[in-house]
Image (cartoon, rainbow, N blue to C red):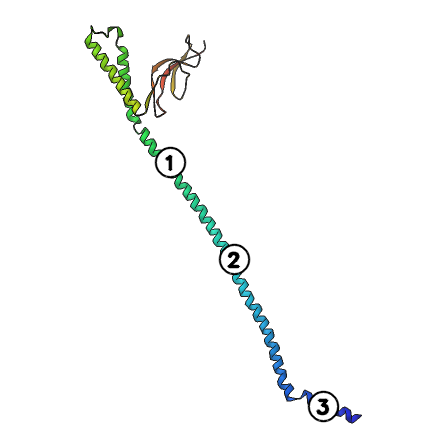
Amino acid sequence: MASWCVRAVRQSYSLVASPALIRTYPRLLCTATQQKNGQRSDEEAEKPEQSAADKALEEKTQLEEQLKEMTEKYKRALADTENLRTRSQKMIEDAKLYGIQGFCKDLLEVADILEKATESVPKEEVTSQNPHLKNLYDGLVMTEVQIQKVFTKYGLIKINPNGQKFDPYEHEALFHAPVEGKDPGTVAIVTKVGYKLHGRTLRPALVGVAKAP
């Protein structure tokens, strides 16, 4: 029995100390180490890929925000340019329409003088028996008619509001007085006619306004 035990121990020792087993054991260790290192390498390879994807997504988001901001700036600049063009066009049109405003005001005095001159001539004396006065009167009337045609051609219209409702934008009230046959708030007397240039009051008519007694 004792000898059998001794033999079993020797066989076990010889198996453990076998050169083949000694040579195989390091290989097994290397293989396990390589497998473990391989798993780590795969994990580390996945991390850069994920990091690159996140970076690309972040850059895309930034570019989209920049594009949106530039689009808004472009729209605002386009709107400002259009507003500037509209204002400039309006200024040019106004300059064409109202550039003669100062000149027209000066001519209004001439028209007023012609009107007063024709009104001051006694109509009963304008006859063929008084040819000099008649010719002078006819010349004044023709001149007045012609100057009114020129005014109309350039958009200058006479305002004679006798009997109309008083309008503070077109009339200037010199006085208020009760006038028989006139409704309160209407123009009773026109002392000087007014003028409008292309719908804009160039000179208000000077008037007297009727009021309730």
Q: Secondary structure at mark 2?
A: helix
Tell me the amino acid under the disc marked 1. Answer: Arg
Tell me the amino acid under the disc marked 2. Answer: Leu
| Point 62% across, 80% down: residue | 28
Q: Are marks 2 and 3 in contact (CB under 8 Å)?
A: no
Q: Are marks 3 and 1 in contact (CB under 8 Å)?
A: no
- In this rendering, would 10 be left or right of 141? right
213 is higher (above) or lower (below) than 38: above
Q: Position of residue 166 (x, y in %)?
A: 41, 17
Q: Position of residue 127 (x, y in %)?
A: 23, 7
Quote the CA–CA distance across marks 3 and 1.
Answer: 112 Å
Residue lying furthest left? 132
202 is higher (above) or lower (below) than 180: below
Q: Are marks 1 and 2 in contact (CB under 8 Å)?
A: no
Graded by Cα atoms within 10 Å as few (under 14), some (14 to 19) or many (20 or more), the crowding at tag 1 reads: few
| Point 38% across, 37% down: residue | 86
Can you identify the residue that label 3 sits on? 11
| Point 74% across, 90% down: residue | 8
Can you identify the residue that label 2 sits on? 57
Give the mark nearest the N terminus, 2 or 3. 3
Q: Quadrant of residue 7?
A: bottom right
110 is higher (above) or lower (below) than 36: above
Q: Nearer the viewer, residue 105 or 35?
A: 35
> Can you tell which mark lies on residue 195?
none
Tell me the amino acid under the disc marked 3. Answer: Gln
Quote the CA–CA distance across marks 1 and 2.
Answer: 45 Å
Give the mark nearest the N terminus, 3 or 1. 3
> Can you tell which mark lies on residue 87?
1
Graded by Cα atoms within 10 Å as few (under 14), some (14 to 19) or many (20 or more), the crowding at tag 2 reads: few
- In this rendering, would 69 be left or right of 85? right
